[in-house]
Amino acid sequence: MRYKIFLLTIIVAISPLIVHGKNLRSLRDQLAKQGFTGMLEGKVHFFRLGTLQCNNTKLSVYYYEWEESHPPGKAIHAAYRILFMSPTFDYLGSYHVSDRPIKTGPSTISFNYPEADGNILQCDVDGLPKQVLLDGDRLLEK
């Protein structure tokens, strides 16, 4: 019985390191090879949010956060994005965001903003939109 509990503990501990059948190093490598402009070294974290139905394709959605390591007394810089990967694990693009979404899928990504100010990200007829209005004045470009 102790062995089963130990094994379950190990599985739970490493599960955040698995990203859609790939490990985090694979995701970093793929992003570096395919034009991602964000930082991939230092304090970088990826969180799989789920999938987004975009026309006839299910895209994998990830939340990216980067925080600059800083010497004492210096300002801290950070960046947050929503990343999209194709079913073949190709990088499709990202949006800069200020907040983590509250819900992902099946066809929208929802943020905790008033509906009148823009609170969802969804695909249009051409796929991922080039611009999205969130929280009234947050115009994001893919």
Image (cartoon, grey):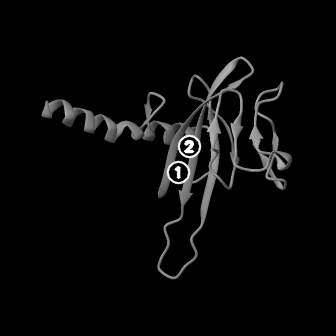
In the depicted structure, whether residue 26 falls above or below residue 54: below
31 vs 133, left or right, is left
Is 80 located above or below residue 31 in the figure? below
Residue 76: horizontal and vertical position, in percent?
56, 71
Name the mark on residue 84.
none
Judged from the image, the secondary structure of the residue bearing numbered disc 1 is: loop
Badge number at residue 32 = 2
Q: Can residue 37 be seen in this view?
A: no
| Residue at numbered disc 1 | 40
Q: Residue furthest bottom?
A: 73
Quarter of the image with the N terminus is top left
Q: In this view, does 9 lie above or below 140?
A: above
At horizontal 78% and vertical 48% (from top left) the residue drawn is 140
Seen at 75% across and 38% down, the residue is: 121
Q: Residue at x 47, y 58 (%)?
A: 42
**What amino acid does circle 2 point to?**
Ala
Residue drawn at (22%, 33%) of the image: 7
In the image, taking residue 63 as reference, residue 136 lies left or right, namely right
Number of marks: 2
**Counting other residues with Cα less than 10 Å from the Cα at mark 1, is it few (<14), some (14-19), or many (20 or more)?**
some
In the rendered image, the quadrant that contains the C terminus is top right
Residue at the limit of the structure toward the left, as seen here: 2
Q: Which of marks 1 and 2 is nearer the N terminus?
A: 2
**Of tags 1 and 2, which is closer to the observer?**
1
Give the image location of residue 84, x and y in percent: 64, 35
Q: Distance between the residues labelled 1 and 2?
A: 8 Å
114, 58: nearer the viewer: 114
> Percent from the top left, x then y, of residue 58?
64, 23
Which kind of residue does numbered mark 1 sit on? Leu
